[in-house]
Image (tube, rainbow, N blue to C red):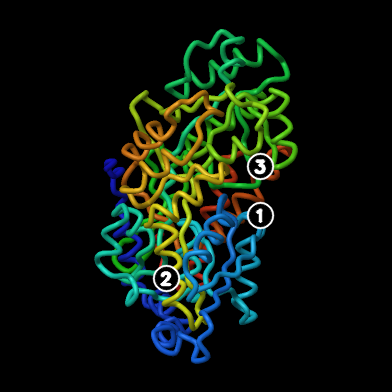
Amino acid sequence: MPSSPARPRRALLLGACALSLTLLTACGSGGSGSGSTQAATGEQATDGKPVSLTFWGWAKGTKDVVAAFNASHPNVQITFEEIPSGNAGGYAKIANAVKAGNAPDVFNVEYPQLPDFVSQGAVQDISKLVTPDLKAKYLPQAVELTTLGGKNWALPLDAAPQSFYYRKDLFEKAGITAAPKTWDEFRTAAQKLKQADPNTRIATFFPDDPSTFEALAWQAGATWFGTKGDSWQIALTSPQTTKVADYWQQMIGEDLVRSMPSFSQQWTASLQKGETAGYLGASWGGGVLKSSVPDGAGKWAVAPIPTWDGSPASGMLGGTTFAVSKDSKKAKAAVEFATWATTTPEGIKARIASGTSSAYPAAPELVPVAKAAFDTAFYGGQDIYAIYQDAAKSIKPNWSWGPAMGATNTSLKDAFGKLSGGTTLGQAVDGAQKATVAELKNRGLKVAE
């Protein structure tokens, strides 16, 4: 069984949810209590037909998971709708559906956004359906990331330690003999790649997706959210975050990285042409890269993400959960599906064997299953799960997500989109700090100035 990564101090967020009366009310609002009661009764149709669930998500391999579940569970059948990824419009679609009263029974939500959905009363408290034995199957920190105010609000699918994917042939051509271990070495490698071919860049800064920047701040030791008494403490402008912002501002300013939308056709084309030689991603990125540039088989390798001092360190970039919408009366069946998808060899194998997913399971016992199911020929047979496992062990502790990440991310995304017009990353972080504080106050939450 693989070792668990360092355990983030999720109690900060739990305490905030419990101590803030407004957020505590939100955590229990939206009919979540009644939804759980309804879910526990009358879920089996009296006409003998199976329980039918609607499910929205975007994670790679999900279609295969649903097909495998439906084939083996005649009493519970899933109707799956693939929606855009959260930051590409999926979260807006889910939020609008919740408001309109036609949300799916279960949907995917990433760890950073779960507190926001909870505080808005959009998901059910599923505590009565999450037994101690079930929780014991998951990494402790994954359980913490899905537990707010002492209640369980989702089941974790994966952990998402950071990794660096790079083109071995382009690095060798530029005289780079090994993947960079530090951010200083990363900058030097970027310069060498550009010198060897003026059209080649080492990686991409995604202006439309703040999650990569947030993971880099996490890796640097930043703690954006905490509590003091019954008040939130917001520290987006910490020295650690400033260091990250200054570094990437210099990389962008010196034209050492590309700036283009995440996972766009433009980005994919740059990978295919060899104009982008690396990708700063997470464990799930192995499958994304493999499916994005299949012609690159044998040219790519995976390495630990560079760190500031050369010692192993990682944040988490995304990571997905299964949550039950507030109005669903089928929570029991929804949790049955989510449990199967996240804790059984059959569920993980169905996802990984699709070839599009390289998720690192939140259930440690299933890591060998994922490793065996993922064909690593694209990476020259490299044991990429060994890289993920070591990265998971080095995840920095003390990181918590805030209750209004929608506002935080919107501010960052808007500012990142203006980098070409003179806005700096430092200004973007300052603006996000102010926007986050304003949103929390607007929701009636206390903020320690």
Residue 263's disc number:
3
Task: Find disc 2 in the rendering and name its residue.
Answer: 335
Instruction: Check disc 2 and report its element: helix, strand or loop.
Output: helix
Judge by depth and name the residue closer to the eye, 387 or 54.
Answer: 54
122, above or below 261, in the image: below
Q: Amino acid at mark 2?
A: Val
Instruction: Check disc 3 and report its element: helix, strand or loop.
Output: loop
Q: Residues within 10 Å of mark 3 (few under 14, many from 20)?
A: few
Q: Position of residue 32 (x, y in %)?
A: 44, 81
135, above or below 21, in the image: above
Q: Residue at x 37, y 77 (%)?
A: 21
Disc 1 to disc 2, C-alpha distance: 26 Å
Task: Find disc 1 in the rendering and name its residue.
Answer: 88
Judge by depth and name the residue closer to the eye, 439 or 263.
Answer: 263
Q: Quadrant of residue 435?
A: bottom right
Disc 3 to disc 1, C-alpha distance: 10 Å
Q: Residues within 10 Å of mark 2 (few under 14, many from 20)?
A: many
Q: Which of the marked residues, 3 or 1, is nearer the chain's N terminus?
A: 1
Picture quarter with the C terminus: bottom left
Q: Position of residue 331 (x, y in %)?
A: 45, 77
